[in-house]
Amino acid sequence: MTDAPPPAQPAYNQQPASYSGGTGAATGEDPGRVLGIVSLVLAFVFALGGLITGIIARKKSKEAGFDNGFAKWGIILSIVFMVLGVILAIVLVALLASGAALFGGAVADLCAGYDSGTYETTTGELITCP
């Protein structure tokens, strides 16, 4: 019986066949997957950061030929939360403005019977009448 010859060794200074050159293509891993998960988490905590990392992750995945669902949902949720934040800010500013107008009207009512100056109320608050 004859033994089979040993497998051929790679030539000097060559990488094995499984080497991907840093692209991730040979291993079958999505290069933007981890960044997509980070994007999804950041969408709930810091929407702008979630949007930016989601766009980067989606681009990396697309270049490698993958569809990154985490990045897609990170982008969508980030946009939704930013729009809700803007709406909430507008509502809060409107409420504060109306509260200031109400407070200003209350001071005007209190000062109706007084001359200009500073007065102390029965609760110890100082009110300045124009």
Image (cartoon, grey):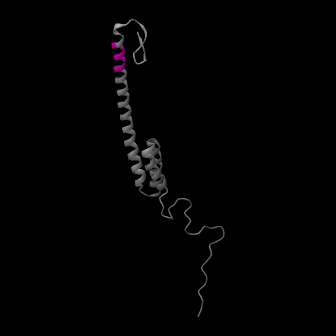
Residue farthest to the right, as pictured: 12
Give me the residue at 42% from left, 53% from top. 70
Above or below, comparing residue 38 to residue 101 in the picture: below
Q: Name the residue located 37 percent from the left edge and 42 percent from the top edge.
A: 80
Vertical position of residue 67 compared to residue 7: above or below: above
Is 45 on the left or on the right of 3, as rendered? left
- 34 in magenta: no
Residue 31 spot, x, y in % from top left: 49, 56
Does residue 103 belong to the magenta stretch? Answer: yes
**Which is more toward the observer, 54 or 85?**
85
Residue 77 appears left or right of 28: left
Q: Position of residue 58 (x, y in %)?
A: 44, 51
Residue at x 35% of width, y 24% of height: 99
Span highlighted in magenta in the image: 102-109
Residue 10 versus residue 38 in the image, above or below:
below
Question: What's the residue at 43%, 42% (across, down)?
Answer: 47
Q: Give residue 60's position: percent from left, percent from top.
A: 48, 53
Q: Nearer the viewer, residue 25 or 53?
A: 53
Q: Position of residue 113 (x, y in %)?
A: 34, 7
Report the side of 120 relative to 5 (left or right). left
Of the 4 image quadrants, the one containing the N terminus is bottom right
Q: Which quadrant is the C terminus positioned in? A: top left
Tell me the quarter of the picture where residue 65 sits: bottom left
Q: Main secondary structure of the magenta part?
A: helix
* Residue sitting at the far top: 115
Q: Quadrant of residue 14?
A: bottom right
